[in-house]
Image: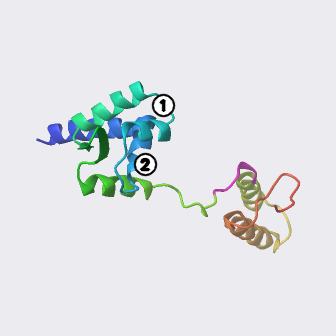
Amino acid sequence: MIVTMERQFKEIASLIGDPTRATIMWTLLDGKAFTATELAIAADTTPQNISMHLSKLMQAELLRVESQGRHRYYKFSRKEIAYAIEAMASLLPHPDAKKETKIEKSLIAFAEYIADNSDRKPGTTKQLKQTIRLLKEFSQSTNYNLHLDGIPR
């Protein structure tokens, strides 16, 4: 049973991982049902291509279709699918999160190297360690980016 679940998980992950199908799933998070034409426009693809992608999502029972007159509207087959897509979106990095740039990492590494290999007077190592701490704090700041010229931007 575990092998079957793993295989099914891989199949669903590969279905959702396709950029066009991911766009379809993201668009459907709106909670509305969409026509194939509307989804093709959202995914910036042709009607023929969207039809193939919708077919795959329907076969996997991720989507269902409802007919209203001559129109067919696609939506999630059950609410848990929307929850799963939302859960995946929660894995995205927070927009305010800042990663250290290569320059900032290099400065911190350089300061650490100097502190570890210092033959200077007593107190210099303490000052360098304080500089390392300040550099680390600075690099984690969301308000500044340290550039080669040292000017915060």
Q: Would residue 113 be found to the left or right of residue 31 on screen?
A: right
Q: Residue at x 31, y 44 (%)?
A: 73
Q: What residue type is labelled 1?
A: Thr
Q: Mark 2 points at which residue?
A: 27
Q: Is residue 49 above or below residue 5?
A: above
- Residue bearing the label numbered 1: 45
Residue 6 higher or lower than 111, as above or below: above
- Quarter of the C terminus within the rendering: bottom right
Please check the rendered image and state whether residue 100 is part of the magenta-colored stretch, yes or no.
Answer: yes
Give 55 or 66, whichever is nearer the viewer.
66
Q: What residue type is labelled 2?
A: Thr
**Residue 132, percent across and down?**
73, 66
Foreground of the two, 149 or 82: 82
Instruction: Say above or below: 140 vs 29.
Output: below
Residue 11 sits in quarter? top left
- The answer to whether residue 109 is magenta is no
Residue at the spot x=41%, y=56% of the render? 30
User: Left or right: where does residue 78 sit relative to residue 41?
Assistant: left
- Tell me the distance, in whole angstroms, between the alpha carbons under discs 2 and 1: 14 Å
Q: Quadrant of the N terminus?
A: top left
**Magenta segment range?**
99-103
- 29 or 97: which is nearer to us? 29
Q: Where residue 90 is drawn, which disc sits there?
A: none
Element type at marker 2? helix
Tell me how the rendering is colored.
rainbow
Residue furthest front as drawn: 69
